[in-house]
Every structure is written in C-alpha cells, then in structure tokens.
Image (tube, rainbow, N blue to C red):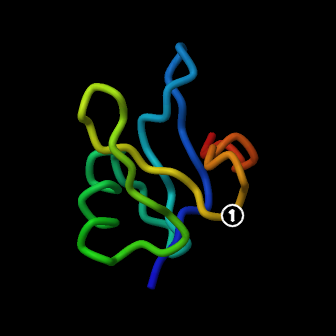
C-alpha cells in the first residue's frame, strides 16, 4: 500500500498534489478518492465546515502536511 511522501503547494500555500511512496504524482482530489478506497495509508479523511472532504496526515498530532518535503 502506498503512502504520501511529498506535497506540492500553489502560491497560496494550498496543497494541489502529492507524490506517493511509489513515485506517482496525484492530484489532491485523486488522493482523496484513493484514500476513501483504502489505497493510501497514513491519511485520514475529514469533513470541513463547508461539507467538503479533506485529507489529514496521521503522522502528526495536528494532521497537517507541513512537515512533508516539497515535490519540487
């Protein structure tokens, strides 16, 4: 099973894509889909205040991906 190893952010600081442990680069939406299907480990799906599904990291207490290195 794959896990997230790196992140890519836009100029606002929002995560737009992830790199997996196998080297694949997937969009945020694709990561949410794969996590919901049980294909990604180390992440949790949460519903935000607007009812949208978001990813959180299981490896830190705050759930952020701030400690992950950048793809580029």
Q: For the point 63% across and 44% down, which residue is it?
A: 64
Residue most extreme to the bottom: 1
Q: Where is residue 7 in the image (x, y as percent from the top left)?
A: 57, 45
In the rendered image, which residue does mark 1 sit on? 59
* SS under mark 1: loop
**Where on the picture, by quarter, is residue 34?**
bottom left
On the picture, is 52 further left or further right than 56?
Answer: left
Q: Position of residue 57 (x, y in %)?
A: 58, 56
Q: Quadrant of the N terminus?
A: bottom left
Q: Where is residue 4 in the image (x, y as percent from the top left)?
A: 54, 63
Q: For the point 50% across and 23% down, which residue is it?
A: 10
Q: Quadrant of the C terminus?
A: top right
Q: For the point 72% across and 56% down, which residue is it?
A: 60
Q: For the point 50% across and 63% down, which residue is it?
A: 43
Residue most extreme to the front: 49
Query: In this picture, is 20 found above or below 69?
Result: below
Label 1 neighbourhood size at 10 Å, few (<14), some (14-19), many (20+)? few
């Amino acid at each position: 099973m794959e896990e997230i190893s790196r992140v890519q952010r836009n100029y606002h600081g929002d995560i737009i894509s992830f790199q997996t442990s196998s080297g694949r680069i997937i969009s945020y939406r694709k990561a949410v889909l794969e996590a919901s299907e049980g294909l990604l480990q180390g992440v949790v799906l949460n519903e935000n205040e607007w009812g949208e599904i978001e990813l959180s990291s299981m490896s830190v207490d705050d759930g952020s991906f701030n400690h992950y290195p950048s793809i580029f």
